[in-house]
Every structure is written in structure tokens, then in C-alpha cells.
Amino acid sequence: MPIDFSLTEEQRQLQALARRFAKEVILPVAREYDEKEEVPWPVIEKLHEVGLLNAIIPEEYGGMGLKMLDEVIVGEELAYACMGIYTIPMASDLGITPVLLAGTHEQKERFLRPLTKKPALAAFALSEPGNGSDAAALKTRAIRQGDHYVLSGTKMWISNGGEAEWVVVFATLNPELRHKGVVALVVERGTPGFKAVKIHGKMGQRASGTYELVFEDVKVPVENRLGEEGEGFKIAMQTLNKTRIPVAAGSVGVARRALDEARKYAKEREAFGQPIANFQAIQFKLADMLIGIETARMYTYYAAWLADQGLPHAHASAIAKAYASEMAFEAANQAIQIHGGYGYVREFPVEKLLRDVKLNQIYEGTNEIQRLIIARHVLAE
Amino acid sequence: MKFVAVIRQVPDGESRLRVQGDRVDLSGATMILDQMDEYAVEEALRLKEKHGGEAVVVGFGPERTEEAIRTALAMGMDRGVHVVYEGFADPVAVAEALVEVLKEEAPTLVLTGGQQADWDSQALGGALAEALGVPVVAWTTALELEGDTAKAKHDLDEGAEWVRVRLPAVFTTQQGLNEPRYPTLPGIMKAKKKEIRKVVAAVSPKVELLAQEIQEKARLGKILDGKDPVAAAEELVRLLHEEAKVI
Amino acid sequence: MVLVVLDHDGNRLRKGSLEALTRARRLAEAFGEKVAGVLLAEEKAPVEEARKYVEVLYTATLGPYTAERWAAGVLKAAEASGAKAVVAPSSRQSRTYLGRVAYALKAGLLEDTLDSWAEGGQVYATRYAYLNRVTEKVRAPLPVVLTVKPNTTPLAEPLGGEAEVVALSVPEVPTVEVLERLQEEKKGVSLTEADVVVTGGRGMGSAEAFKRVEELAALLGGAVGATRAVVDAGWRPYAEQVGQTGKTVQPSLYIALGVSGAVQHLAGMNKSKYIVAVNKDPEAPIFKHADYGIVGDVHQVLPALIEAVKKLKD
């Protein structure tokens, strides 16, 4: 297949839609929801209205069947306006992906179709208070009792956990089996014994709801199990291999915003009788930002393309996520530096970029974990 | 019934314009469906949704105008006609280029934006109406069909009025008429399969464009601190009176 | 002949007509022609005043304005005078019906021109494009239809004679039926013709706050403008909106109160001779486009401004 860097007509339209949506719907309220630390439901409703929410659900289940490349195009645009708000649909896709990967036709009908009918979210619960990166060391227990499992334990840092219609929960049937003992269960909101507690006081991405989920002897029907017993860990890893790519896309969006804000300020702000954009010290920073944005976007597109082609993409998605999130953090950092004191206060948007994008280095696998994945790939030869 | 929206693609008002030589260079600009024409598309869709029939988008301009036509299709228009022409054309020439297509379509009514965001022309509605031999209602803010007539509210130079007009007629659209919808993702997907008929325009411009330049007026930029509002106001009034001599 | 369309309010010619006359006379001189006028009336028209400015005056009383009637009237006058150039003051109405006229005459339409002149048998003009951001030079051979942007041209003086008045018989044309006129409350000068415009933006905070804006506008003999946000909020009528989707103004003095300065708004006022901005945010883009400004609370600065202007007037 020849290399082609152009977007299709539909992708350009999709990009234009997402860009306009970001500018008209997200940008005006981003600061407000960041300050209130509240989920912007009006934005979620509008996302649903224009078809951008849960759009990766295939057409046969009522969705739009967006491919990964489509998703990263949208992700960059939405995150440009607010990474925290973009995390909400992104985390919903994270919840949907295990159902796409391992769900039966009936499960897809049951769980996915309702998410296309109304503004509704899904969630993905893997991390626990005592373990995040070591995902095989799960403590949440699932015990089979006849036609259901009894689930008990606590999940931590779960985006959309309190808003979601259902959460894919990873639990162990037998901790000694490590990753071979993991099962993936879809737990619906309102199931007795299932409680979501909002985590307050986040540094950034405050518009997205992050939760601690507590399961106290929650009965989950066997029909809610994705794949077989023992396949849960594989499902989780395959999911993350995909969903790290939108994290990279969001990072590119944040970096682009940082560059735009820095450029605007540098051309307006004067020092020593001229705009600071005239100084090489500033110009180099702006150039470095663009180098990072362009390379990260290209690599993110590449990782998305691999995923869409059904080719191995675990290490590519890890590279994209780690590289783009670090690049974006540095871009936000330099944007603040260019703003000087003004960059450190809330009247200017750049401090929020840094607070928000810090999380991109942490969630969906810390960048250290990404490096382990990449190193495994290197050493496999 | 058939509702036609005539549209063009223009640079986004917020995108930066450049001049190369003595012409505006749009190669780096973000191009969009003219926002005034967007009201025309939305109104055509609303009329179709209410009264049935077909909503057709007719675009005029270079190849890239197809993107704007696709946007209109993604908003819900049924099909498109693209009258292809590269370069500047005055509204009389545009109307001449469109008249055959519009006569073929034989629409119930034609809608188009009140002003073009690139050539700053307000004459296309009037010129199209003359070309079709029908009345024009300019700067429309409300539109209802009643049998084979339409009742419309539109702005005059001063004030506004309600009129009744026998159809077909041309309406020019503006802010206040409606709130244009987003071209949704399902709309974008469906638009892929919709037809755009290409017509090569026979255009004979009456007006020739000789040169374009961007003249930013240099501003004085004397900004006063308003911590003491009375002192600042008095100083401002003094400057306006003594320096600018405008009051 | 060069035909000039004389706009009026029933009693007097509008200022724009006198600007159009100046332009028409320039073209007529270059072509070695005379200037004829056409005076179209709903009921009455200032015929005696108009006679003083032209060599021949065509008149017709047509009933309520519609684009079709006015186009028919102008076309009839063009035919009667044999005019190859039609000049008119620029307004939303004239730019609509002259679209019809230009099409009917297969004429080059030069809209909303800043300046115009004849050279080598062709008509040249300068005008704005791209939402007032670009100035362009255009050219058209005869016949042409040309509209004159308000406040761009010296006002014509009377010629010192009295033109012959020719009553036109304008054919009936298919047109709209006017059901109801909704007159704007007449508050001082019209926005597009005003030499001073005082505009309030979202920063005014409420509809009530515009009383002070009106007061300052009245003191300066100007008109009140509004931004899109203000109109969307329902604080002011759309007729007062300045900007891309509203009116374009070019006064000597434009005062923007609590206006941030979005590109769409700038498109409607960035050619004003002097721009004054009052905003509490020193980073508001409007200050980049201002000749004078005050960084401060508009609710404190505006009353102080009103007092300062009153003091100056005393």
C-alpha cells in the first residue's frame, strides 16, 4: 500500500465538525467547569446530538463505526479546547472497547446500543488503591455462585465511574493465578452493593469525573462476563493498546493550543521596545513546540493506522502515548515560561494546559509502563 | 416542493488573510461555508422538514467549493449542484452562470445569504431574482409558507416589514432567521453517498479585479488607566476634543 | 447621461444622495455628460430640493417600497435618460434593488465604493472586501451601476438652476405585497450614517445599563450600536448590531464600551476614523485596534465620561 498522508473528504468534514464543536461548545465553558470541578452535561448532550459521543460503536449496533484514525482526528480538536472535557468521551470509548473486543452479539446489543440512543457513558475499571501499574496483582474478587458472580473490592481513579451506565470491572477469580485468573464483568449502574465516590481536589482535568468504585458483594449475572474466565487480563491489555492512541491525540491537541497561546502572547507582549517574538530565545521555544506537535501527530496517525489495519500496534501506541504526552507537557511548560508571570495565573489559559496534560503522562498506563512495553518490543528480537 | 439554497465557500472570518503580489492568497486560509449562506441552508432544511419535498444546495465557485457543498449535504440537504468557476466573478455574472441550473430545478423558492464574506457583495439575491423574473425579499428574518405564497418578515434600511409574496421568489438570509444546525457525524457519513452534479459555468464577468491590499489603519493606542474613572474620563474627553478633534 | 438615484426621507434628500451626486458629477465630467436624477417616492418626495442638484429630474410615485418597484423605476429612468451609468447611495435596500437593475442592464456592479473615477472610457472604483479587511481596486466598462459608501465623499452643492421635472410612467411589476411596516423607534441618527457611534458589548451586563449608552450617544449626536452577544441576549434590537452579521459603520468616532473586540465585530467598525475602547480587561483585543482607551470598569467610567462631555459642552 502506498503512503498517503492526506485525509479523506469525510475526515476533513469530521475534523471541521470537531473543530467547530470545540470552539463553540467546549471552549466557552472549559474554564467554568475546571473551576467548579463538575461534569459538563450540556456538553455531553451536545456531543451526543452531533454524533461524536460513543462514535466507535459499529453501525450495526446503532453507532457510527468510527475508526481509530477518525477518533484521533476528533480527539486532537476536542482536547485543543479542553483535555479534561475530552477525557469524558475518551474514557467512555475505553469502557466500550472491551465489549467490542470480547463481547458476544447479544452483549453488544445489550450494552452498546443504549449508548447510541441517549447521552450516556461507559467506564473501564482496572486500577485499584493498592495497584495501578501492576495490573495482574488485582485484589478485587469475583466468586462464581451459580448463574452469577459475587464481586467485592475497590477500584480507584475510574473516569466516568459515577456517570457511566455500566462499568467493565476487572476482578480476580484466584489471586494466585495472577493474570490468568482475571475475569472482565460488566457491572450496571444501580446494581445493589455498587457505589461510586467522587474523588475531589484533582490538579487538572477537573471537568471529568474521577471515582473510587466500591463493590460490596455485588451480584453480577454470568451473562455480563466478557470472554471466558481467565481472559480478562488479555482483554484489558488489548483494550489499552488501542485506547492509548487517543491519549496521544489529546496531547497533540493540548500542545497545539499551547503553541497558539504562546504565539499570540509573544507577538503582543513587548520587552526592550519590541515584541518578545522577535527574540531568538522565544523563537526557539516556538519552533521546538512545532517540531513536537508535528512529529507526535504523525506518529499518532501511524499508530492509529496500524490499529485500523489490524496490524500489531502495542508498541506503536505506547510510543505515541509516551512521546506525545511528554511533548505536550513540555509545550505547556514552555507556553507558561513565555507568558512569564501571566502564565502562572488563571486569567490566562496556559496554566490549565499544564495541569490538564500532566494526567496524560499518568493515565491509561504511566509513561514508565509504556517504556516497559516498548523495551519488551526491543528485547524481543 | 423544492427548496434551493445557493451557497459559496469563503475564508473563515477569523483566519488570517495574506496578500501575495496584489491578490489575496487563500491557500493557507481555513475555508468554510459562508455563514450567511448557512442560514439559507438551515431554512431550506426547515421548510423541507415541515412541508416535505426536496432541499437542493447549489454551490458556485472553484473546485474546493465542493467541501462547502458537502457541509450543506451533511447538514441534511438532499443533493448538490456545483457550478464550477475559478476566480472572481461579480454578482451579475454569478447570477448569469446560475440561471440555467435554477430554471432547470424549478424550485418553490431560492435562498441565499444576504452578504458574501469574501467579495462583500449584497447583490446576488436581487440579481438572481431578476434573472429568474421573480420578486426578492432581502434580509429575511422570518419565513412561512401559505399555499402558493410565502409570508416573510424582512429588514428595511430603517425598521422591518411583513410581506406576502407569490412563489417562486428569492429570499436573502441573515442572522435571526434561524439557528443553523451542525453538520452531524451521521450527516457527514450520509453526505458521502449524496450526489453532487458538476456544471461548468459559462461566466462572463462584467467587473475586473485589478488589485487587492490589506490596509490596517495604524492606531494611536493611547490607553489610560481607569483606576480613577473621573480623571481618566476627563483626560479621554480632552484628547478627543483637542487632539482628535472629533467632539 | 449619468443617472443618480436620490434617496430621501419624504421631506429631504439624505446625506448619502449628496455624496452620490458628487460621484455622479465626476463621472459625468469625465464622459462629457450631464447628470440626471431619479426621485422615487412612496407618497411624497422633496422634488423642489432635488431639482436644484441635477439637469433633469425623473420622478415617480410608486407606493410602498419594494425592490421590484424601485428597480423598475430606476430602469425606466435609465431608459428615458439613456444613462450608461447609474450612481446611488449605498444602503441595504439600494444594494438589493440595484442587483436587479444591474442584471437587467447587464451592467458592471460596483458596490459600496470608497472612491470612483473614469479613465479611458471605463469606470474604476475602490471598495472593501473580505469583511472590510481588504481594499480592492476594480474596473468595469460601461454600463455600470455604482453605489457609494456613506461618509466617503464630499457633499454636492446645488447647481444653481432648477431642473426640468419629468414624471415617469413606471410599469406594474410582479412584486411583494407589504402587509405591515414595523417602524423602528426613531432615536436620533441612523446607525450607518452617524458620525459618532457608541456601542455597548456584553460587558455592559444588562439591558438597563444601555440607558447610559443612549445618554452618551445623544450627548455626542451619535447612534447606539450593539455587539452580537448583546443582541443575542435580547438587550438591544438586531437593527443596532454592528459587525459581520450586522451593520458596517465608518464614523469619525467609534466608542466601544465593554466590547471585547471579536473579529466579527471588528469587521463592522474597523474603518472608523477614531476608535475608543473602555474595558476592564487590559488584554481585550479591542485595545489593539483602539486609538484611545481606558482600562477600567465600564460602570464607573461611562458615568464619568457622560459628566466629562457635559462639562466640555458647558
Image (cartoon, grey):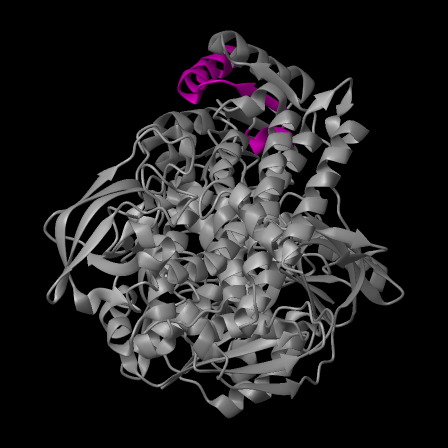
Taking the image as drawn, is residue C97 in sight? no
**Residue A151 drawn at (x, y percent):** 18, 52
- Residue A159, above or below A65: above
- Residue B224, above or below A169: above
- Residue B70, above or below B138: below
Image quarter hosting the N terminus of chain A: bottom right
- Magenta-span inclusion, residue B201: no
The structure residue drawn at horizontal position 22% and vertical position 71%, both measured from the top left corner, is: A110
Report the side of B63 relative to A109 (left or right).
right
Majority secondary structure of the magenta segment? helix
Image quarter hosting the C terminus of chain A: bottom right
- Magenta-span inclusion, residue C307: yes
Taking the image as drawn, is residue A23 in sight? yes
Report the side of A136 relative to A282 (left or right).
left
Residue toward you, C223 or C293: C293
Outermost residue, right side: C120
The structure residue drawn at horizontal position 70% and vertical position 73%, both measured from the top left corner, is: C107
Tell me how many marks there are: 0
Residue toward you, B159 or B17: B17
**Residue A27 drawn at (x, y percent):** 45, 44
Q: Quadrant of residue B59?
A: bottom right
Residue toward you, A356 or C268: A356
**Residue C28 drawn at (x, y percent):** 78, 60
Outermost residue, bottom side: B104
**Residue B227 drawn at (x, y percent):** 49, 10
The part of the chain drawn in magenta is C284-312
Report the side of A279 relative to A264 (left or right).
right
Residue toward you, B213 or A264: A264
